[in-house]
Image (cartoon, helix red, strand yellow):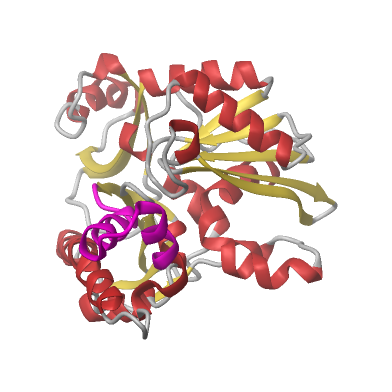
Amino acid sequence: MFRIFSKDDVSQALGLDIGSSSIKIVQLRKEKERIILDTYGEISLGPYAGLVAGQAVHLGEEKLIEAVQDMLKEAKVTARDAVVAIDPASAYVALVKVPNVDDRELRTMIPLEARKYIPIPLTDVQMDWWHIPTNVNIGVEERMINVVLAAVNNTTLAGYARIVEKLGLTNVEYEIHGYSLLRSCSPQTQNMVLYVDIGAQYTVISLVFQSTVLDMHVISRGSQEATVQLSKALSISMETAEDTKRVFGYKGDKSNPYVKDVMQLSSYPLFGEVARLSLMYERKYNQNIEGIILLGGGARVPGIFDVYNQTVHIAGRIATPFEQIGVPHFLKELMDKVGPTYAVAIGCALKKLVS
């Protein structure tokens, strides 16, 4: 089984988030009761495949290791204890209802139930599960209990193991996105909350209730969709389109009114799916979603709430994960700006440092 809730007693830790378009790292250290930022960094993967920064790529293992090594060197990383974020496309999280039996019977029952939720053979995954605390009231029939089931593809874990070995990292653990986000971006409520992590290639939805991750869903749309649409509609290069998106975003360019139109049109399928899933979860669990937390590189596109509010009618906010970290005063404004990008990496590093 892979470990989700374990913690090792270390004073310095590295969080590593390998995304579809970039790698993010955060190194934190613990001094008494304070968590302090040592170093951080992001490196685009596009150039390693002959593409522009911001584009999603599928690098081979050697190229990926080269990119991570470059990032660790550039950021002057010294920590060896690490937590690596798992590719969401290779992870499965679901809430299942099972009879209230003892743990020995449950161990026999869970694999049978898991076949209903995991779309690949169970021999191809590492699986874990845990009881939902009885004080988490999400409705369950008498003589039944709620169990969270989590699984990760064996191929993915084996690939990570080879990478971290070649990087010389030690005492490595792996983390599913939703659990990292609970640490780095507290929902600040015990009511139901949705995390929306907008990456380049896909968006990860994590449903949280009373500090428990109940569900995870991957939408095959991300912020790169806007770049592609801008490039096609305006007949400009992908590099220029990416720059246009990052500078003007959904607010648009006054000198070119088509930028705003194209950007807004590109957002509707993604936020429409967020709205649909929100409604589905509210009906499924008979709970109102109190708020939505936006994070990831896509959450930094200017004017994102302009389009979010047109489609999703649940209060939203941008994640600010560096708020709980001690950072130099001159970096505070920058950390507030880039924070959504590093939320997962921060949560991973915190796994080693907080209870």
Q: Is residue 51 left or right of residue 11?
A: left
Q: Is residue 171 left or right of residue 22?
A: right
Q: Quadrant of the N terminus?
A: top left
Q: In the picture, residue 136 is in which quadrant?
A: bottom left
Picture residue at 29% right of the left edge, 49% below the top: 215
Q: Which residues are magenta?
A: 220-245
Relative height, residue 170 to residue 141 (above, below): above
- Position in image of residue 227 (x %, y %): 32, 58
- Position in image of residue 271 (x %, y %): 24, 66
Task: Please name the predominant secondary structure of the magenta segment in the image.
Answer: helix
Relative height, residue 176 to residue 316 (above, below): above
> Is residue 235 a member of the stretch shown in magenta?
yes
Picture residue at 30% right of the left edge, 74% below the top: 259
- Position in image of residue 257 (x %, y %): 28, 82
Q: Which residue in the rendered view is the most extreme toward the bottom?
A: 254
Q: In the picture, residue 184 is in which quadrant?
A: bottom right
- Position in image of residue 261 (x %, y %): 23, 76
Q: In the picture, residue 326 is in which quadrant?
A: bottom right
Picture residue at 40% right of the left edge, 49% below the top: 133
Q: Is residue 102 visible?
A: yes
Picture residue at 52% right of the left edge, 56% below the top: 341
> Is residue 231 a member of the stretch shown in magenta?
yes
Relative height, residue 63 to residue 95 (above, below): above
245 or 96, nearer to the observer? 245
Q: Is residue 206 visible?
A: no
